[in-house]
Image (cartoon, grey):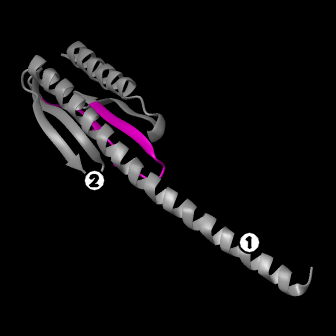
Amino acid sequence: MDFRERLQKATERGQKAADTKRRREAAAAISEEECRRLHTHCRLELTERIEECLRHLADNFPGFRHETLMKDRGWGAAVSRDDVNLSGGSRANEFSRFEVVVRPYNEFHVLELASKATVRNKEIFTRNYFQQLNEADLVTFQETIDQWTLEFAERYAAES
């Protein structure tokens, strides 16, 4: 094989490598867009469940204020309440809050729930639950939302 033939083959290999790279980048762009779309679908499903659970919680404990959260740290809902404790001639303000959010889409391709619960000025838990986006099981996420809500309700009722 002379130099011209080797040069031709090297050129062909380079063109094949460039074509392969372009195809991979195109596939990655499509999958990135697909991941964003899947995250949006899951977020909408989960925020509906969060809204439902926290509205029931606020209905069950009069005095809680419900708010929808759409912030840079996620979408979801929160319930909160301020109480005044007048015992022993002194006055103390007591704050209770429970929030659950779906974290925004990120480059790690995970679907993540985050929650924070405070009962009478004491933080009782801060939790995160996540799964890879392509393996995310919405039923498990919904059960997790239910479990966290029930745990907050039980802890709040125990402190009342």
Q: What residue is shown at x 29% (from left), y 46% (from top)?
A: 74
Task: Please state which amino acid type lies under the numbered disc 1.
Answer: Arg
Q: What residue is shown at x 30% (from left), y 45% (from top)?
A: 40
Q: Does 91 sit above or below residue 132?
A: above
- Relative to the observer, which residue lies in front, 24 or 122? 24
Residue 96 is at least partly visible in this image: no
Which secondary structure type mostly characterizes the magenta part of the structure? strand
Q: Which residue is mark 1?
A: 13
Task: Please state which amino acid type lies under the numbered disc 2.
Answer: Asp
Mark 2 residue element: loop
Residue 94 in magenta? yes
Q: Which residue is mark 2?
A: 72
Q: What residue is shown at x 14% (from left), y 21% (from top)?
A: 56
Residue 37 percent across, percent down from the top left:
34, 48
**Number of numbered discs on residues:** 2
Q: CA distance from mark 1 to mark 2?
A: 46 Å
| First reached walking from the N terminus: tag 1 or tag 2 | 1
Numbered mark located on residue 31 in the image: none
